[in-house]
Amino acid sequence: MADHAHAPRPLGGNLLTPFTLLLGVLAAIAAAILLYRFINGLGAVTNLNDGYPWGIWIAYDVVVGSAFACGGYAMALLVYIFNKGQYHPLVRPALLASLFGYTLAGVSVIFDLGRWWNFWHIFWPGYAQVNSVMFEVAVCVSAYIVVMWIEFSPAFLEKWGMKDVKQKLNKLLFFFIALGVLLPSMHQSSLGSLLVIFGRQIHPLWQSGVLLPVIYLMTAILLGFAVVVFEATLSSAGFGRPLETKVLTPLSKIMYWLLAAYVVVRVLDLVFRGALGTAFAATWQAFWFWVETAAFVVPLALLSTEQARRSAAKLFTGAVLLMLGGMLLRINGFLVGYMTGDGWHYFPSFAELMVTVGIIAFEILAYIYIVRNYPVLPAAQPATR
């Protein structure tokens, strides 16, 4: 557990700044577009069609968004399963980012449903299709959102002075922490399984067959670590706090070796399936494959030494590139590499993009509000640089 000196504390400070006002405006624009969408239907605001029934709201908001929200999962895996207690100060802020990321990813699914008023069917046993990968993803994501709110609730209980309730909850938290590791392991791998079902509709560069669940799970954990580094660096710069290099440097070493393992798996998969040759064709798929690959390979060189992993700039750059690589892996698999047949095209409309931007803005705004008013970030310590 965290010692008293590192105990989380509210940051305090003024919530109304030019930056938070901008975030609020972007979130309000997204809300207005969504209101129009729910009144007039998907076709009124999106470029979705029969060839591309899933657009950016699924590919980014759900598939990418939930992977970006794996910081809490990755840290819980490290701290509670592998007993690395020195990383405990990073758990609560990572969990908060995961909480908003997953909650908004879950809500985003409703935006994409044609008959959105039937969304409750997924929770009704009479409609359950237990052989469906989508059913498993939907149930696991929904359950994980509830679990994360329970895991994070001690922060609210501390703020509200409900010590007795918190003590009783602490006796049960081990159960929810176990669920908090199991559920994302299931649905993050199942997001890869969705592409298995698509079969030859997915370009060979991303149709890894039975390895897809492994690839998606490995990159989800990898992105979780990268997001923790990204969020810690931005919190340090944005709130004027010292960077926690003492824990981020060894964390980045774990991230580095997981990245190396992923790159080996990815390359061997392409070679043994005979798909590597398609990466040298003059196609958009090949172009975006190399951009994605570069985003994974460059951090391997950038963070290869202990000295490099002590550099805040290199840590941040490596984390951003890994997030870009993980995002492109999913966007490429679900959109760029999706070959539904001749005559079908898709590029998100301005309204779709603004909804996605607004969701991100709302997530950042909510994060700022919570860390300023509730005990999330560890008390600032003297700089270790």
Image (tube, grey):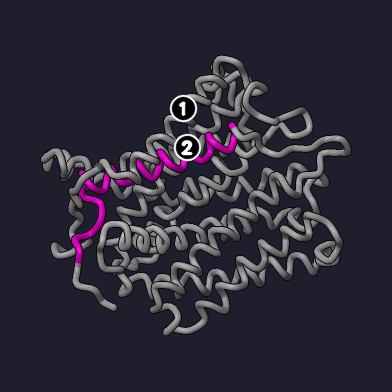
Image side of residue 311 versus residue 219, left or right = left
Q: What's the amino acid at mark 1? A: Ala
- Camera-nearest residue between 252 and 31: 31
Image coordinates of residue 235 in percent, x first then y, are 32, 58
On the image, which quarter does residue 194 sit in? top right
Tell me the quarter of the image containing the N terminus.
Answer: bottom left
Image coordinates of residue 226 in percent, x first then y, are 47, 62
- Most prominent secondary structure in the magenta stretch? helix
Region rendered in magenta = 351-380
- Vertical position of residue 42 compared to residue 88: above or below: above
- Camera-nearest residue between 299 and 34: 34
Q: For mark 1, give the secondary structure.
A: helix
Q: Is residue 374 magenta?
A: yes
Q: For mark 2, give the secondary structure.
A: helix
**Residue 124 visible in the current orientation:** no
**Residue 266 visible in the current orientation:** yes
Q: Residue at x 78, y 33 (%)?
A: 51
- Residue 358's tag is 2
Image side of residue 209 versus residue 164, left or right = right
Q: Residue at x 56, y 39 (%)?
A: 137
